[in-house]
Amino acid sequence: MAVTRPEGLPSGRSRSLGDGEDGGRFGCRCAGPLAGIWILGLALVACGPTQNLPTPEQPIAYDHQVHIEAGLECVRCHRGAEEGVHAGMPSVQACAGCHRREIPDHPEVQKVMLANENREPIRWAKVNVIPDSAMVHFNHRAHARAGIECLTCHGDVASMTVAEPVRNVADMGWCVECHRENEASDDCLACHR
Ligand code: HEC
Ligand code: HEC
Ligand code: HEC
Ligand code: HEC
Ligand code: HEC
């Protein structure tokens, strides 16, 4: 859906999430079912990292901790995470290039080598996702430039075996709250275009 700023709404940097006017504004603009979604959003923010989100099953038992301990940096595999819109996922060739020498006989690594031979991509399940249908613009580069670490949004992936969601990232309340705290834009059109 296209979102335009409702008439008469000021855009500014000084609004805070707590003031009653905000609740009213969203209440007015987003009457009906959406008001419920907004309230649910606030409830999720309040729950923070303890949200019980499902961790999807992955085709190969890739383990972050093992690779971070081996000295690999996040951007080695997620090449766009600092300079791109999307962080991106590593290609099967990138895994195979190293695993030709590293533990090629490990059963999970053999799945990687087979996919590489067959030129089949590995279909990693998405963990953090803002659905395309939401038409929300998110971009990694802007956040890396502002000095926000991966940890802030994704939790301590470096010590995870399977990457788990630590929060729902498709949550406007979360985005807007941090933007206001950091004097980043809370203009509707910064995110909805
Ligand atoms: C050797 C390659 C590699 C390195 C290095 C690596 N990752 Fe990953 N990452 C993967 C793979 C493969 C997956 C998909 C499997 C999974 O979810 O565990 C993944 C998944 C993720 C996800 C979830 C993706 C999604 O769909 O939302 C996040 C977040 C993530 N990595 C963050 C990091 C961070 C932060 C670091 C550095 C501390 C890092 N990764 C280092 C390979 C890597
Ligand atoms: C730059 C080298 C390098 C790259 C690239 C790399 N790995 Fe690894 N991987 C390692 C090392 C080192 C180990 C640990 C080996 C050991 O235990 O002796 C490892 C271990 C593993 C293991 C065994 C994990 C366990 O539980 O012990 C799997 C599975 C694996 N890697 C899959 C992958 C996949 C999938 C990718 C691509 C997304 C990938 N690796 C990319 C170096 C690499
Ligand atoms: C301000 C919060 C925030 C920060 C900081 C952040 N991410 Fe993300 N990340 C997200 C959101 C939101 C998504 C989902 C994006 C989407 O679906 O369009 C995502 C998605 C991902 C994915 C899934 C693949 C993709 O491109 O969508 C990976 C991998 C990932 N992030 C890795 C990282 C790494 C590595 C860092 C640190 C260099 C990092 N992220 C920093 C919020 C963040
Ligand atoms: C932890 C704090 C934090 C979170 C969470 C966060 N952001 Fe941001 N965001 C920032 C900061 C800081 C900037 C940089 C502002 C600047 O450069 O002036 C920024 C910049 C942006 C920009 C670029 C704005 C521009 O005008 O170029 C967009 C778009 C954006 N964020 C969208 C999102 C979305 C969508 C989410 C939620 C999925 C989100 N952000 C979550 C802190 C955050
Ligand atoms: C910092 C980024 C950001 C800003 C600023 C922002 N939004 Fe959002 N908005 C989001 C995210 C993320 C979602 C959740 C998308 C989803 O449903 O997956 C969302 C969801 C919504 C939805 C619900 C859409 C749906 O399909 O349910 C509406 C309506 C909406 N926003 C309106 C607004 C209005 C009006 C403003 C300005 C007052 C605004 N947004 C400002 C990020 C933002």
Image (cartoon, rainbow, N blue to C red):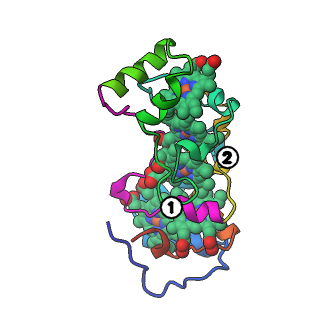
Q: CA distance from mark 2 to mark 1?
A: 16 Å
Judging from the image, what secondary structure is the residue with disc 1 in?
loop
Q: Nearer the viewer, residue 100 or 4?
A: 100
Q: Is residue 110 left or right of residue 157?
A: left
Q: Inspect the image, locate mark 1, and give the three-letter code of the amino acid beneath it.
A: Asn
**Residue indicated by mark 1:** 139
Which region shows up in magenta? 118-145
Q: Position of residue 188 (x, y in %)?
A: 48, 73
Q: Nearer the viewer, residue 79 or 144?
A: 79
Q: Report whether the residue tagged 1 is closer than 8 Å to ligand 4.
A: yes
- Residue 76 magenta-drawn? no
Residue 134 in sight in this render = yes
* Residue drawn at 64 percent across, 37 percent down: 72
Count of number-bearing discs: 2
Q: Is residue 135 left or right of residue 140?
A: left
Q: Position of residue 130 (x, y in %)?
A: 44, 52
Q: Inspect the image, locate mark 2, and give the three-letter code of the amino acid beneath it.
A: Leu
* Residue drawn at 47 percent across, 88 percent down: 8
Rendered image: mark on residue 151? 2
Rendered image: mark on residue 103? none
